[in-house]
Amino acid sequence: MAIGYEPRIIGFLCNWCSYAGADLAGTSRIAYPPNLRIIRVPCSGRVDPLFVVKSFQLGADGVLIAGCHPGDCHYAEGNYHARRRIALLRPFLDYLGIEKQRFRLEWVSASEGKRFSEIVSDFTETLKRMGARET
């Protein structure tokens, strides 16, 4: 691991739950690493797997998709679609040589600012231990 290495993380956050959870962490002054670049999406089910691949292609060290807890989706079944898409994406990422620890799918509700902070902190530390992704 290089001294001073800071991973670049792209986060696709659902507007209704996960983005609101990130907002709660901010308004509650719950600190988390600044490594995450947030992309707000209407629903985790709208995240095309190619967005994840493109993020890695453009130099991201890690990608996080965060959505509503199963059963709590604003669009009824969007997070179930996300879960199925991700299940199909994982073997493809392995085929591309991207370690499975560099990609995470998490469920965060609007009231879980602390949990959001913990997820981002843990993911950042995991990526720091792994070091920069070889392209």
Image (cartoon, rainbow, N blue to C red):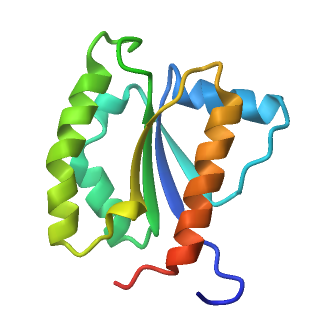
Residue 131 image point, x, y percent: 52, 80
In the displayed structure, 87 sits above or below 43; it is: below
Q: Is residue 121 above or below residue 129?
A: above
Quarter where residue 73 is shown: top left
Numbered marks: total: 0
Q: Quadrant of the C terminus?
A: bottom left
Image vertical order of residue 114 relative to residue 65, above or below: above
**Side of 52 where 106 appears, left or right:** right
Residue 32 in the image, given as x and y percentages of width and height = 73, 49
The residue that appears at 80% across and 39% down in the rendered structure is: 30
Percent coordinates x, y for residue 114 in the rendering:
71, 33
Towards the viewer: 109 or 14: 109
The residue at 45%/62% (across/down) is 62
Left or right position of 20 against 16:
right
Residue at image location 15% in from the left, 58% down from the top:
91
Q: Is residue 56 positioned above or below 77 on the image?
A: below
Whether residue 7 is visible to the viewer of this picture, yes or no, is no
Left or right: 104 with respect to 98? right
Q: From the viewer's perspective, is 14 left or right of 48?
A: right
